[in-house]
Image (tube, rainbow, N blue to C red):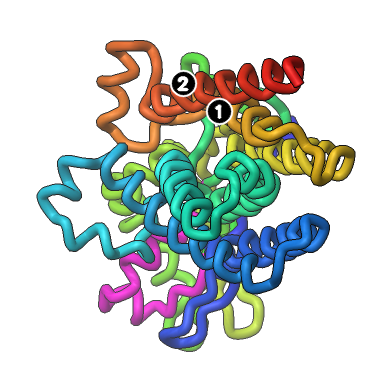
């Protein structure tokens, strides 16, 4: 079957202490693309560049702070309330779209009061670029192999094994044995043989190639290291166990390419829904819809129309997509077992209700006019 083996590493490059991550690049592009689109809209509306710069500042701060606090308080409140300084470690990951939404709504309210513009007027323009930004952010999640979907047998499923293999080896990189062997990287591809089914989960054969520096080790040492440590990596990493299953009796085949020793070994991959890709495509199409409606009406856009549509469509899709996704933190399991919905879905319900209320107000006001 045509499963996708997702081999992308979260880092674009790593030079000494300098690391450049795909997620950071896409996060920055989200703001740059959004500012470009918003500048065109502000120009149509006769707003100055100074107005745009001020509004952009409000939104950047609100997005980052809101998304971080949202993750900490919605998903892991016990941990972060006990360790409040950990909230500042945004580089370790943990951002929540619902928190970003609350932050943006509040910042936009402050902006509307200070600059004396209609709250719904600015929200209608803002959600166009928020939808575009959401597409970039979810692509960043895909590059990070995070916010994963549930196992599926669909042929377009993704296997996210490689990133977690890399993490296991890299977290072990300070070990004297690993440094001595000159570990370089892993590469995962579809292996030979038949898929096997364990319960409802389909496992597909993987061929994993681990590279070592041939100047500091030899083929026998490399194979011995893998035979000894792969089970250890597997036992220590719950993330790794979510994506691969060990072969009961793997074969290790060694080759040498110049100064690089390559050891190929076998495992099984768990195909999953690429939920990040679903959401990225959906939010991009939502951006196209909202922008098309704006260019149809421009200054005469019914107040609240774009914001209402954005909230209803985005968070309805979020509720549906969550059924295809794994819970982000273990504490969600108990909540979902109790009420049938996880945290993301529960937070989305009031947003849909708010959106419906705004749309009702929009159409009743338009009809009365």
Image coords of residue 309 (percent x, y) = 67, 28
Q: Quadrant of the C terminus?
A: top right
* Number of the label disc, if any, that sits on residue 349: 2
Q: Is residue 180 left or right of residue 351?
A: left
Answer with the quarter of the image where residue 278 lies.
Answer: top right
Q: CA distance from mark 1 to mark 2?
A: 7 Å
Placement of the N terminus among the 4 image quadrants: top right
Q: Nearer the viewer, residue 5 or 263?
A: 5
**Outermost residue toward the front in this view:** 369
Q: How many residues crowd mark 2 within 10 Å: few (<14), some (14–19), many (20+)?
A: some
Q: How busy is the neighbourhood of tag 1: few (under 14 within 10 Å), some, or many (20 plus)?
A: many
Label 2 element class:
helix
Q: Is 169 inside the magenta-drawn segment?
A: yes
| Labels 1 and 2 touching (C-beta < 8 A) | yes
x, y percent for residue 204: 60, 33
Q: Which residue is mark 1?
A: 315
Q: Is residue 44 left or right of residue 62?
A: right
Please provide the residue range marked out in magenta: 161-185
Residue at the image point whose x is 63% and y is 29% from the top: 308
Magenta span has 85? no
């Amino acid at each position: 079957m045509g499963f996708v083996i997702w081999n992308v590493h979260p880092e674009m490059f790593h030079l000494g202490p300098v690391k450049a991550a795909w997620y950071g690049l896409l996060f920055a592009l989200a703001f740059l693309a959004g500012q470009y689109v918003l500048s065109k809209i502000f120009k149509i509306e006769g707003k100055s560049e100074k107005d745009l710069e001020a509004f952009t500042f409000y939104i950047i701060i609100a997005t980052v702070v809101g998304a971080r606090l949202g993750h900490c308080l919605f998903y892991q409140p016990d941990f972060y309330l006990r360790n409040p300084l950990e909230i500042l470690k945004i580089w370790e990951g943990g951002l929540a779209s619902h928190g970003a939404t609350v932050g943006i709504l509040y910042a936009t309210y402050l902006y509307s009061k200070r600059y004396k513009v209609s709250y719904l007027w600015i929200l209608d323009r803002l959600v166009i670029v928020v939808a575009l930004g959401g597409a970039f952010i979810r692509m960043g999640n895909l590059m990070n192999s995070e916010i994963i979907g549930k196992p599926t047998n669909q042929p377009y499923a993704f296997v996210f094994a490689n990133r977690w293999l890399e993490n296991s080896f890299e977290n072990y990189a300070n070990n004297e044995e690993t440094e001595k062997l000159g570990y370089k990287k892993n590469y995962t591809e579809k292996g030979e043989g038949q898929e096997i089914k364990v319960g409802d989960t389909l496992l597909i054969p993987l061929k994993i190639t681990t590279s070592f520096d041939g100047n500091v080790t030899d083929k026998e040492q490399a194979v011995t290291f893998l035979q000894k440590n792969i089970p250890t990596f597997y036992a220590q990493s719950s993330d790794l166990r979510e994506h691969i299953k060990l072969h009961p009796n793997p074969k290790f085949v060694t080759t040498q390419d110049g100064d690089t020793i390559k050891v190929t070994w076998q495992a099984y991959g768990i195909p999953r829904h690429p939920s990040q890709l679903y959401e990225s495509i959906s939010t991009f199409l939502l951006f196209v819809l909202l922008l098309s409606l704006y260019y149809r009406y421009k200054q005469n856009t019914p107040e609240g129309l774009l914001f209402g549509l954005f909230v209803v469509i985005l968070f309805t899709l979020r509720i549906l997509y969550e059924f295809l996704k794994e819970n982000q933190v273990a504490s969600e399991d108990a909540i979902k077992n109790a009420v049938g919905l996880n945290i993301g879905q529960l937070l989305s319900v009031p947003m849909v209700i708010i959106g419906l209320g705004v749309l009702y107000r929009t159409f009743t006001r338009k009809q009365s006019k």
